Amino acid sequence: MSDVYLGRLPILDTKQNVVAYELLFRSDHHNKAVVADNSAASAKVIIETYGQLGIENVIGKRRGFIKVDAQFLMHDSILLLPKKHVVLEILRGVEITQAIALRCAFLKQKGYQLALSYAGQSSNHFDHILSLVNIVKINVNELTAAHLSEIMKHLSRWPILLLAEKVENQETANRCISLNFQMLQGFYFTQPEVISGKNIDPSKLSLLKLMLLVVKDGDISEIENELKYQPGLSYNLLRMVNSASSGLSAKINSIKRAIMILGRKQLQRWIQILLYAAKQKNGSSSDALMLTAAIRGKLLESIATIDRPHDKNHQDRAFMVGVLSLLDTLLGMEMMQLVETLNIQQDMREALVFRRGYLGQQLQLIETYEKGEHEAASALLSQMIFLNWDQFTHMELEATAWANRISDSINQAT
């Protein structure tokens, strides 16, 4: 088959844990979705994509939302999609005829989950299939506060989950949560919410101290002592090390022992990622931030390995830039203040604060790709003569699979 490309937008619960992805299939690296072709051939492309990429690599143990039009919905090939892994999202332009309603009932009986892109201006149009739908998706940017409140009241008559899309800042996220949306889609979770004039949260201060020790190659006893203030982090760290060292006969039960087995550099990598999984003062943590930071770190390292295959120091710094790129969001501090505190190298500072320089350009490429802006990503990639689109998308998939394995391990019963 021809090359396939995949966009993947995270869907979060109200605690910023990734619960699903919206999957955007494209025929090439331009920002054109195959599923919008209004053709039953879309099903074939999606099925072949799953076979080529591997669904477990694309979404881990989460579900993938797939947009479907009327023709795709009625086509028998839709039954080849794995019902345990997908949510069929009915496009708002689909006319809800009796045949469509019967088809939805059939798919639900077969075990498929259904989502509905809700068109608020014609609410009654969908009423007779809402009893079949699991999730209703609403673009909150299209509606006034009064109209949104009216729609929420109307939808409360059915036992459905509500998903707000186009949530691009924390203010909108908070408003949606107050309106009882159970899921949010958008990149608000990567945007730092910096509150000037206030002291840093003590729990975050402990994280910053730990990060300082890690970045500056602090003494192992100091790192171990600081971890005492983050018992949950220590526990997850040892679980991760034991998982990575599954061939050992004896279980690793101390940080010092972990360092002996893995080495300082590898241990520092785990700590950098797991900082995002640490509990904050309010008891929350962000699975979404951790996943995104892990993917960025691994992908930047992979790019650096192709660019400079014999420069391990450059590869390590690339990994660190990827992971640190969301530290301002995690800690609620300005990135400029953070890099001055961490006292890292100048090219890393330029990359993190301004997205400038070699590493900054590569980080910008990854961020653009994350948002599904494939044309802009393609333009950035064209400036990197050592890397092509196929290599980049393959490395991104490998980085995602790696990050999903980390997340799944941490999210196991504790």
Image (tube, rainbow, N blue to C red):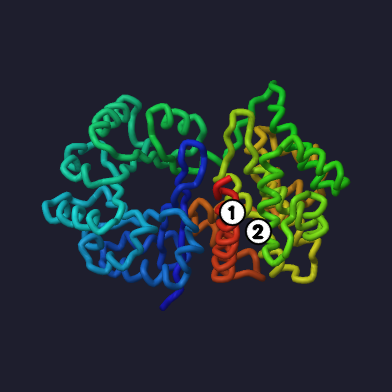
* Quarter occupied by residue 1: bottom left
Q: Which residue is mark 1?
A: 409
**Residue located 65% across and 40% down the image:** 278
Label 2 close to label 1 by CB (< 8 Å): yes
In three-dimensional space, the C-alpha distance between marks 2 and 1, rounded to whole angstroms, equals 8 Å
Give the percent coordinates (x, y) of residue 222. 85, 41
Give the percent coordinates (x, y) of residue 5. 46, 66
Give the percent coordinates (x, y) of residue 407. 57, 52
Q: Is residue 108 left or right of residue 206?
A: left
Q: Is residue 97 left or right of residue 196?
A: left
10 Å crowding of disc 2: few (<14), some (14-19), many (20+): some
**Residue located 16% across and 51% down the image:** 101
Which amino acid, by three-letter code, is at mark 1? Ser
Which amino acid, by three-letter code, is at mark 2? Ser
**Residue located 34% across and 29% down the image:** 144
- In the rendered image, the residue lying farthest to the bottom is 1
Q: Which residue is mark 2?
A: 243
